[in-house]
Amino acid sequence: MLSDEIVDGGFYAKFPGGGLEYGEGILDCLHREALEEFGQDVEVLRQFYTSENLVESRFVPGDQIICVYYECRLQPDQNGRRLPRFRVAEQAYDFVEHREREESFRWRRLDEIVPKEMSFPLDQEVLARLLEDR
């Protein structure tokens, strides 16, 4: 899944995720972010990658970011189906309201994503690692 976002007037395509809140563990953050962004929880399959080099925040210069990537899938409903209960866009940047800060989600097969489509170098690196891992 990809997340298309408008942040401070910029358009970004990335893997979904968010920031750790004070006092929160990494897995607690993952579940909270899934509930906030998707409105449903996820099942964690495995931790896939943790950033190993300096990643400076694009939005707060001087802040260093540590990124932890997990492979997840949607929690099944009571009938065992893993269907999204959130809007899935058909195309990139398919926003409903075009507000200053907006987010939409779309499904893409890994082998169909072009690395340059990802806005952040670390997401491009993780995409390459996911493709190698398949």
Image: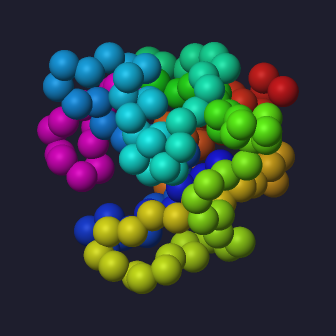
For residue 5, side relative to residue 25 (left or right): right
For residue 33, side relative to residue 105 (left or right): left
Magenta span has 22?
no
In the rendered image, residue 92, in percent from the top left (x then y), is placed at 62, 70
Q: Residue extending furthest front?
A: 78
Instruction: Please tell me whether residue 44 is drawn above or below residue 17 in the rendered image.
Output: above
Q: Residue at x 58, y 17 (%)?
A: 47
Q: Can residue 39 be seen in this view?
A: yes
Q: Residue at x 51, y 50 (%)?
A: 38
Q: State the scheme by which the image is colored.
A: rainbow
Magenta stretch prevailing secondary structure: loop
Is the C terminus in the top left, top right, bottom left or bottom right quadrant? top right
In the rendered image, residue 81, in percent from the top left (x then y), is placed at 79, 41
Q: How many marks?
A: 0
Instruction: Please tell me whether residue 54 is drawn above or below residue 101 in the rendered image.
Output: above
In the rendered image, residue 95, in percent from the top left (x then y), is placed at 50, 77
Q: Quadrant of residue 74?
A: top right
State which region is magenta.
Answer: 53-67
Q: Residue extending furthest bottom?
A: 97
Closest to the observer, 32 or 133: 32
Instruction: Please tell me whether residue 38 is drawn above or below residue 92 in the rendered image.
Output: above
Q: Can residue 51 be seen in this view?
A: no
Q: Which residue is drawn at 42% across and 82% down?
A: 97
Magenta span has 56?
yes
In the rendered image, residue 129, in percent from the top left (x then y), is placed at 69, 28
Closest to the observer, 78 or 98: 78
For residue 18, side relative to residue 83 (left or right): left
Q: Quadrant of residue 132?
A: top right
Instruction: Please tell me whether residue 117 is drawn above or below residue 97 in the rendered image.
Output: above
